[in-house]
Amino acid sequence: MPADRMLTTVLRAYQDLPSAAATKIDAIFGTTTSLLSSLNNPLNLSLLTSHFLTARAVWQQQTPTDLRTCLRVISVYNTAAFHVRRNELESVHLPPGQPRLGGGLSADEWARAVAKGADDRSSRWRHCLVLTGILMGMEAEDRRSLSRGLRGTLEQAVVTAANLALEDPVRTGPLGSGAVVLALTYAFPLLADSVKGMLNCNALLPAIAEGMIGEGFENGGFIRAISADISPENDVWWSTNSPSVGRLEDLVSRPLVQNMGPLSRLAAFAVQHAAHSNVVLQCQDDLLDFTAALLEKWGQCPLSTIDMSVEATALLPEVLQGPWAMLWELLRKIMYAVVATLQPTMGRALLDPNLRRDFIAPAVASKTLHTLRNLSFVSSRQGASAFQVYTFTYLTSIDIITRYPEACTAFLEDTQPPPPPPTQNGQTTPSPLAQALALFYLNTAEHLPLSIPTAACETLIVAPATSLLAPTSWLSYAQIQPESPSPLSQSQPPNNDNGPQHPQQRQPPPPPALALELFEASHSCVLSALSCPQHDSLAASLVPYYVDALLSSFPARVSPRQFRLAFRTVAQIAAGPPFPLAALHPDLAETLLEMVRWRAVESGEASTAPIPSPSPSPSPSASASDPEQQPPLSEQTALLLAIVDAIPYLPLHAVEEWLTRAALALPAVPDPAMRDAVRSRICEVLVSGELDVERAAVGVAWWGVGGGREMVLSGLPPPGAGGNAGSGDGEFMMSGALGGGVAEHGGKERSRL
């Protein structure tokens, strides 16, 4: 069909009623793309664009918030521009006199003609779609099709159209605002920095927040639709045929959801460059409300009771690989988008004078932490929070709020998890959602003891942590006896319309996926509270309980590295300044070391078999200070290494004695490699600078005239001691007592420096 006749036909089709045009809308878009690529008269190009932007058949097809048509409009002009530029390049190689391919117009001529069609007959937001399509087709992927001047003009036209549309929200409407946001997600990477600075971010940021939360994520309504399809009490569980699955598939295919990464970068730019800080604060409030509603809806959804460790048995394979994976991919996308928007907000809280004020800064930090807590059921899943933007947002919020004790206390009071449920043979376990919220609370509380009073620290940090470390807590039971049945496995339907009965349904499930991280976070909270000198009254009563819990947990639930780190911290707290505990209980540090030495050498309870190396933990608290990986150690070796680790913190008079005791314990280690590990650690403490000047002098004297070298390298007893001194094979003596070896060595007593 000739181009003129095709143009007349498509212009007539533009005016069809939506009901009549529904069956041929694809043909309308295809014909428009073809005409844009082949028309050779600039006036016809302008006419076609002008009528296309007001076509009743095109714009009355969609719902008030559906952006798929807007995306197709961008695609039409992107494709046409690409073809025009390709035809121009190929026509250069044609022989003279042969007609040029396509319409024969150059890229600049074609772009000017189409841009003139974006006239006053159509809305500004529709102009933004057309101009974005032209810019993408000509300049994306480093094509550089337009002249420099025309490209700059086109970039400014995109920004001008976007600003005019956003500054008139009444005329633009929700669809227009969403369309502008969609167009800018594509055009933004192509804009020069000077042109980006022309964006009215005060108007753009609310539109982005509305598009992200409303059109993009449906305000979390998809979770409520899933809940409506599931009825555990009637043995009805999620299936691939549920209406909510179709709704979920439709949601993830929406333009803004598919482009959530570029949209997040656009949101970050808008937050950074918004002139009014109130706009930024309103955006933060919108995200907080959205995530709070999302958390509430997820808590009411039966799927939230499925622990990650039992997914394979609780869900049918087709659900697990299809809708379930799609749901969590969408939830992770929500978390990434929200965190990417909060990150520049916290950056402004550090630099913006309006947000740094003492009555605003703690509120900004607290709201950010509340928002991250609302998303903790997503971020705690398979280390989903392990990316730089999340880390910056989280730690910056903590850095700000720790300057305000009242804000710290208020946040902990607002987010404190409920007491653990009463344990009946370990069968009562909190829901996975409650575990995720408790884990976020403990990981955050670990950073706050230095900023709150002792009473608040005991109530809000120590009490929740110690309740999980108690031998009767559900957490300890779940880790010790993971074969105990859970309520979830009992609630699964034995048979329903979704498929046959699961063969593994009656098998005992594994422990909760977050059990180990909760255990580590509880230990970290207690150590953090103990490390604060102002909580000395709390430390005096807490240290004995904690060391007992630590010893009872090792090595079943605490790795050698974690045990050594925890014991070294407690020994440092109990040994001396800056901690006042040593003044009240001067013998506490040596008592703790004696407890460990007795278990390692004297009692015979410590195992000498190698402990399997655990897999790395994704817990932020556990990975913050990881030393280099140690070779496989036994329980006995780890206990001895913990003693050596604590020696640099002991009082001066006890350093030589405990160096001797550590050295005399070496023959009790049967494995030569493990014995060498303890021997190397003793030498490392002496030469690595861990000892201060006075203790280093004691160590040098002990190594030389005190017989330390012989004890460590050759296993010989110290001068003035019997052959079995300290080995546990001879008679029991008080620490420092003189044995029969004094007479054997000529009565020379070992000197103490």
Image: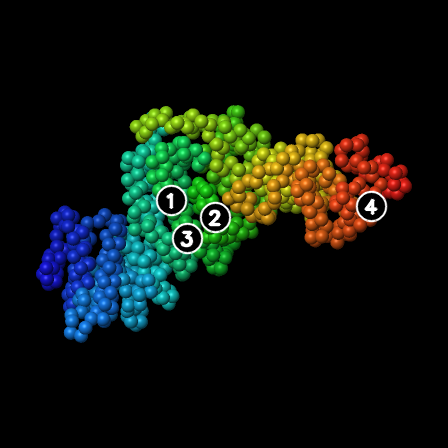
Instruction: Give the mark nearer the N terminus: 4 vs 2.
Output: 2
Q: CA distance from mark 1 to mark 4?
A: 66 Å
Amino acid at pointer 2: Ala
Q: Are marks 4 and 2 in contact (CB under 8 Å)?
A: no
Please rate how many residues cluster around mark 1, counting C-alpha atoms within 10 Å: few if below 14, some from 14 to 19, many from 20.
Answer: some
- Between the C-alphas of marks 4 and 3, the distance is 63 Å
Q: Amino acid at mark 1?
A: Glu
Q: Do the CB atoms of the residues marked 1 and 4 lie less than 8 Å apart?
A: no
Residue type for callout 4: Arg
Residue position marked by numbered label 2 in the rendering:
386
Residue 43 shows up from this direction: no
Question: N-terminal of the two: label 4 or label 3?
Answer: 3
Give me the C-alpha separation between circle 3 and circle 2.
17 Å
Do residues under tags 2 and 1 come within 8 Å of each other at their CB atoms? no
The label nearer to you, 1 versus 3, is: 1
Residue visible at 15% across and 50% down in the picture:
24
N-term mark: 2 or 1:
1
Q: Tag 4's secondary structure?
A: loop
Q: Is residue 706 above or below residue 728?
A: below
Look at the numbered disc 2 and give the secondary structure of its residue: loop
Residue 291, image quadrant: top left
Q: Position of residue 66 (x, y in %)?
A: 26, 49
| Residue topped by disc 1 | 329
Q: Residue at x 12, y 62 (%)?
A: 3
* Location of mark 4 (residue): 752
